[in-house]
Amino acid sequence: MIRRCLPWLAVAFILGLTLALMWGPMRDDTATTDETVFLGAGYSYWQGHRYYLNVEHPPLMQLWSALPLQLIHVNPPSLAGGYFDEKLFPHSGVDWNYDLQTPTASPPRLEGYYHYPAIEAGMFGRQLVYATHNDADRLLFWGRFMQALVTLATGLLVFLWARSLSNVTGGLLALMAWCFNPLALAYGHLIITDPGITLMLPLSVWMFSRFLESPRPQTAILAGLAFGGALLTKYTAIISIPIFGLLAIVAWWRQRHSTSEKPPRRVFGNFCLFAAVAWGTVLVFYLPHWSPPPALSVEDAHCLQVPSWFVNFRWLLIPRDYFKGITIMLKHVLSGHLAYLHGQWSENGWWYYYPFAILVKTPVALLLLFLAAVVMAARRIGTWSFAEATPWIAVAVYLACALTNKADIGIRHILPIYPLLAVVVGTEFARLKPRHRLLGWLLAAWLVETALLAHSDYIAYFNELVGGPANGQNYLLDSNFDWGQGGKLLKQWVEQNRLTHIYLDYFGTGAAIEYLQIPNERIKPPAARELSSGILVVSATHLMAPDYDWLRTTHEPVARIGYTLFAYSLAASTNHPPP
């Protein structure tokens, strides 16, 4: 009895330690750029405002994050209803390309459906968290706690999947490869959709592979529920479709060339059941808004950058809010986003962005585990079972899709590959003899040490290959490094040095700075260049832009605050700290 409980005690210990490692960042990180938007939108959904505000993301994870806010007292923003009345924003907003509309552009009302309320979403979230006499830290903590639970669930999924392919040893090694990855600890506690898709996409892949191996109504329903949940978590879940397609081809090819397997019966009917359950899950969440998008003229569609296919096939697009969101997401991905890579800036991205990000953001111990798993798997590729091939196929397709993405703004967008890779690590090392398996445990121990040493600024983590987070700003920015998480560290630094005023160019949620009562004056590069005295603090994401070339080449920072904030003394001053 005790022997059977030991693996589960080990799982509980690892998951408990993972939660403990995230606990400090959950409490101490200042709201990152997107968190107030997601938390505010989720709160508004619970208050009955449909899925209006944060339309670029499905509702499930936003509802999940904001669930604790229904159990504690929350002061809503004054005139909260105004944020959901497009008439109050007649000349503000963005088109479906996420470009600001011109003041003369009057977006069509049409029940407000085609209005993209990105500005309102940002304002409502900031007001809810920071400007309504709420305890901002409390709201953020509980929203983050819900996300941390999702990350722990991903760990449990990894353990169960790897154990099913190997044994308990493989499951535990896979669990460690996921739970002590600084990337999981960095984004797994934030109020964003990435923790959700990191759980649901691997789960849907695993359930679909089991359905292909045994196409019965039970497996079809489980796979459909998992895929429907993924679709409600993040729109990038549509990457599952080519993954499923390739898995189906492989399963069909193996069955056709197998002499021992009998052709499965009623495959088509069970596949229809899978599709019906998946899409039915989505429809249930959008009940009762099942009417198609309203008609739109060619002129208005051009004004708002609504694609022609959406206008032509709008009568098929049910639920309409889901298709609106997925269209905006696709336009964002394909049109690009200003991004930084090792000294270069681009709005069109780089095909090698994510491979580079993996190389510099993944711990060396984990890279070695992945490399060893690749070598071991390649040596026996001819003997792979379909179940063993499944996570490899999913990783390959997901990365192939990511290479075409022009919105290169963070490794978090490929976070779902890490639990899949953790599964293959555990599976491959479990096949080795105990003395050879020791290498896997040693690398896992190194990974644990890495996670402990990186505590608690996991967002800024970079591996030893590039000199760690001290050099992070030279390689990647935005959510890879500097996402506005250091506001509280800035407050501590200002108070420790008894500063009564700083100039600040901050990348993050500006309302957090006012909430923390940091004495500051916001400034931009042209005005900063004219300063002749005082302390200037610049976030890394802004500092590395060409507008600050003059500052980087002529000044050395007098202090560095939490890796991501650089403080400069612009002239002799009586109230700035010594170098």
Image (cartoon, grey):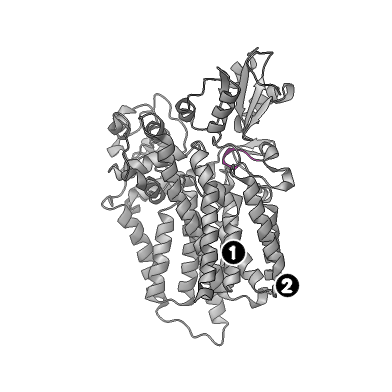
Q: Amino acid at mark 2?
A: Arg
- Report crowding for label 1: few under 14, some 14 to 19, many 20 or more residues within 10 A (C-alpha): many
Identified at 71% across, 68% down, the residue is 438
Q: Is residue 310 above or below residue 429?
A: above
Under circle 2, the secondary element is: helix
Q: Is residue 145 visible from the viewing direction of this image?
A: yes
Residue 205, position in %: x, y? Answer: 50, 64
Image coordinates of residue 196 in percent, x first then y, are 46, 53
- The residue singled out by tag 1 in the image is 174
User: Magenta includes 479?
Assistant: yes
Quadrant where the C terminus sits is top right
Q: Nearer the viewer, residue 22 or 165?
A: 22
Label disc, if present, on residue 435 of the rendered structure: 2
Q: Main secondary structure of the magenta part?
A: helix
Instruction: From the viewer's side, name the closer residue of 302 and 578.
Output: 578
Q: Is residue 76 above or below residue 459?
A: above
Residue in the foreground of this view, choosing between 466 and 231: 466
Within 10 Å of disc 2 (Cα), the crowding (few <14, some 14-19, many 20+) is few
- Residue at 65% x, 78% y is 383
Relative horizontal placement of residue 294, taking residue 507 as reference (left or right): left
Q: CA distance from mark 1 to mark 2?
A: 18 Å
Task: Name the N-terminal-most of marks 1 and 2.
Answer: 1
